[in-house]
Image: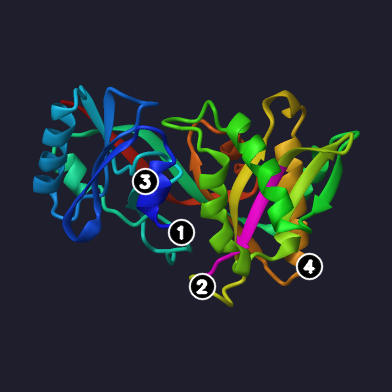
Amino acid sequence: MDRLELYKQLADAEVVPGPAGAILASVNPTHAPIGALAAPTGGVPSIRAGEAWLRDRGCIAAQGPLEVATWFPYRANLGPHDEPTFWGEPTAPPEPWIEAGYREVARYASSVCGNADAIRYGESKAPKGVTLRVLEDFEASLLAIHRIVTASFEEAYAYSPLPFQAMAAMYRPLQEHIVNELVLFAESDGEPVGFVFGLPDLTNPGSGRFLVKTLAVRPEERRGGLGAWLVGELHRQAAGLGYDRGIHALMWAGSRSRNISAHGGRVFREYALFFREL
């Protein structure tokens, strides 16, 4: 399923392609009358063209870079750029947005953390009555991942729920790269209540880095550090596989993940989402 087909899974979302099939602008009913603009292929003129399209559809503001919803490419890379780009990292520059009069509305960061610090902090938060399970059946786990993510990310900035089939279509291409020991579930009474999804840094094989791609815990289970424990256990698994550090990737400033990463982690890159009234 290509990206445009995935966008159609967001009911009534309108998308206009830009040059060479790139996304220019979109209206997601979850966030209307605020429209979304993708990373511009033509600088400020592309932003202005997208704004005109959004105004014609009744939008009173625009934010970007954002393609329809935060499941898809978004955020501008603020740097610094002294560390190599990791797999899946946004690379769009912020300058066109600043030149077009946009202001920052949300901030994100990526941190690098050694295994020992993450394991130590996770151990201090080990929950009672919760067991750890390593990924076994990828397809069977997709429904649990969808349920937990939908509940956990509801409060995240600019988040939109995604139907199960669309989310599954996004995750399935990752299957060939998945290392089962890097995908962990926390279970209570036999039911998954949280998970952490790790991957090798596919852009830099042999670097000793792995990615903490997604951490999600059901809101009613956010007790005493379940997320920190999951991250620590992921670092433990990664250490056993020969990785020496993890990238806690693309964390929203308002997320609990930032608090977890602060224990032994070092922020090495920041990102922003920009906003402007039309």
CA gap, disc 1 and disc 3: 11 Å
Q: Element at badge 2?
A: loop
**Disc marking residue 88:** 1
* Contact check, label 2 and label 4, Cβ < 8 Å: no
CA gap, disc 2 and disc 1: 11 Å
Given residues 3 and 252, the one toward you in this image is: 3
Q: Residue at x 61, y 37 (%)?
A: 149
Q: Earlier in the sequence, mark 2 or mark 4?
A: 2
Q: Earlier in the sequence, mark 1 or mark 4?
A: 1
Per the image, the residue denoted by label 2 is: 204
Magenta part of the chain: 195-202
Q: Residue at x 40, y 26 (%)?
A: 30
Q: Position of residue 3 (x, y in %)?
A: 38, 53
Q: Element at badge 1?
A: loop
* Contact check, label 3 and label 2, Cβ < 8 Å: no
Can you tell which of label 1 and label 4 is closer to the viewer?
Answer: 1
Residue 101 in sight: no
**Disc marking residue 240:** 4
Please tell me whether the stretch drawn in magenta is mainly helix, strand or loop: strand
* Mark 4 residue crowding within 10 angstroms, few (<14) / some (14–19) / many (20+): few
